[in-house]
Amino acid sequence: MAEPSKVDSRHSPTGLSRNLRRAAGIAAVAVVLLASTAHAVVGVGERKAPTGDATVDANQDPRTRIVVEPARARGAISPLLYGVNHRYAYDGFGMWDSGQHRAYPGLVAQTRAAGVTAVRYPGGTIANTFRWKRAVGPVGQRERSPHGTASFGEPLAAEFGPDEFGQFLEQLDAAGSIVVNFATGDAREAADWVEYMTAPAGSNPRGGTAWADVRADNGHPAPYDIPYWEVANEPDLAAQEYWRSGESEASTHELYAFGGSTRFERQPVATYDDHGPNAAVSNGAAGQVKYAKYPPVAPSGQTVLVDGQEWRQVTDLDSAGTEDVYELDRDTGKITFGDGAHGNIPAEDAVITLTYTSGPHDGFVDFYREMKAVNPDIQVCSAMPTVGFLAAMGSEHAYDCVVQHPYVGPNQLSNDLPVEEFRAQFLAQADNRSAVVAAAQERIRTHAGERSEDVSIVVSEYGHLARSNPQGVEHYHRSLDQGLYNAELLRELIDLGGVSVAMRHTLVDYVFAEPPEGSTAVGAPDNAIIAGPGPETVPQGQAHVFTLFTQMMGDTLVASQVVDSPVHMLQNGDHLQAVTALAGTDDRRQLYLIVINRDARQDVTARVDPVGYRHGSAAEVWTVNGPSYLSYNTPTRPDTVRLTTRTVAVGHGGFDHTFPAHSVTAIKLSERS
């Protein structure tokens, strides 16, 4: 008998799938209702509700008030909204001690303290060409995968492989989300990975290799908790089309949905683990091997060119003489050249290209079918949220979730703005980014019909793109403002409903030490919620905000409203409401209120009114703040931005509380017996 999983049932694929389908149903109803009623908080930007979501007496004085109605439940809050995107390469970007073969203990403790509930792997762009079977087993025997960024493509090692990822999840008591290789892999490879990670040892759901037993032989008999699986990363972007970038009569979204073939003219060849530009250059060695980037290679019509001169395919180099020939394995795309006696050697520095038809390739529908056949309880997500894909899928073809990456970047903000105006416009973007998610929900309802009731949104990356930065501020992406934005977007997503998972980019990176060569090509180190590398990692403001939400939010959203918040008009015509709020309860009838004061300079004193709630005379108050909205933590000053906790007297009714400038505050009240 297989060893049962020891994972908490709230994260298990079966339990989580059931609970989130129920939550998604509640959220879908809530979204429909909210379309004709009011939002809890007046939105920043231009999205305004006509009236409040809580009852307000207009005759009271006009100072800022926060009205909370715990009796008016608005739906469940997914426990997996407090997640992070994480990447496998470069020792997990500084969190993996390859000498001790473990995550740095300090990093584990800090991630647990942050309350991270979901982790994505093996990352974003680099996940697109990750070959998982090369990354399991003894570390010394593992092979490298190509870099997913086409302009780099260099080989990446996987000391932090799938098993290390699964065990890291167990250390955190977190659920996993995995991005499968759509660019250079196929549906069978993805299904094998589902089996390796989630099937009980002793089972073999699809025949062939019993991958769960391979996992057990590699030291982990129990399945890992990986309820979410994304098919590709950002396939709607031109830079991540891979085999779909070739010529085809079908559109790229149709190719993503249903698969197919494409044609490439004089594409530079690759090597087994390198898709970079230099991989196409001959080293002048005998018997060298190159690869088509996107096999399989169609049975006819391919041409290999060496410095523009066509070479001829043969079935057996041993039978060839001193002639320009090669062997080709169409399934793998392997191209083998001669040793000088049996087939010529391409001259050193010659560039080798291949003209060929790539395919046929599997599409999303094939990945979905094969992966669900292994484990019907997992959630298989489409990573293409476009109208074209959703219309092509219609209501006929299934998908469990749709991925969104609602980043703030240069398209939303001008880098020419002075810092105080920039940060105001940046913080106001949370409303606009949640509107992007809401628009995706509407597209799903339009095209999926009745299926849409069971489709959730997975926000598997969000944050602030490095290319967007205010004047004269070198490390804005480390700042307390990023924590305020993190809190505000979480507030928006919880208020919106229908989002099952959200993951901030990124967990950890080389912030306070020189990164390995090539690692900076995969994003901005300053975006890490925990600045590395280990062993001396440093939590930033975003990590403290996660702690606050995971400990002080509850699991049921209730009605709340901010009345008469200070409002700042912005140069772009938007406005920034200084104070926003969100309220929740738990099964012990405790009431939680999270308040974000986005004002750069002014504290705001507000009257907190818990309508109809008989609470005790003391409240627990947690606050994330620092000396400035630009503050961040360093190894020598790790507590510049910090989380403080205290108990305050509040009496038995409404009470006043002062919310510091540039802060996130949580207040917990307990019901009076």
Image (spheres, grey):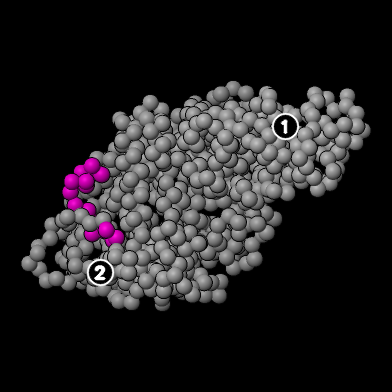
Packing grade of label 1 (10 A; few <14, some 14-19, many >=20) is some
Q: Amino acid at mark 2?
A: Val
Viewer-closest of 36 and 632: 36
Residue name at image x 47 percent, y 63 percent: 468
The residue pinned by badge 2 equals 567
Q: Secondary structure at mark 2?
A: strand
Q: Where 19 sits versus 661, above or below?
A: above
Viewer-closest of 523 and 58: 523
Packing grade of label 2 (10 A; few <14, some 14-19, many >=20) is few
In percent of width and height, residue 353 lies at 72, 39
Specify the segment rendered in magenta: 30-46
Q: Is residue 457 found inside the magenta-colored segment of the image?
A: no
483 relative position to 612: left or right: right
Residue name at image x 49 percent, y 40 percent: 230
Question: Which quarter of the rendered picture does the C terminus lie within?
Answer: bottom left
Viewer-closest of 430 and 538: 430
In percent of width and height, residue 334 lies at 73, 33
Viewer-closest of 23 and 15: 23
Find residue 303 and name its label: 1
Q: Are marks 2 and 1 in contact (CB under 8 Å)?
A: no
Q: Secondary structure at mark 1?
A: strand
**Disc 2 from disc 1: Cα separation:** 65 Å
Question: Which quarter of the rendered picture does the N terminus lie within?
Answer: top right
Q: Earlier in the sequence, mark 2 or mark 1?
A: 1
In percent of width and height, residue 16 lies at 40, 39
Evaluate whether residue 210 shows in this view: yes
Q: Where 473 sits versus 181, above or below?
A: below
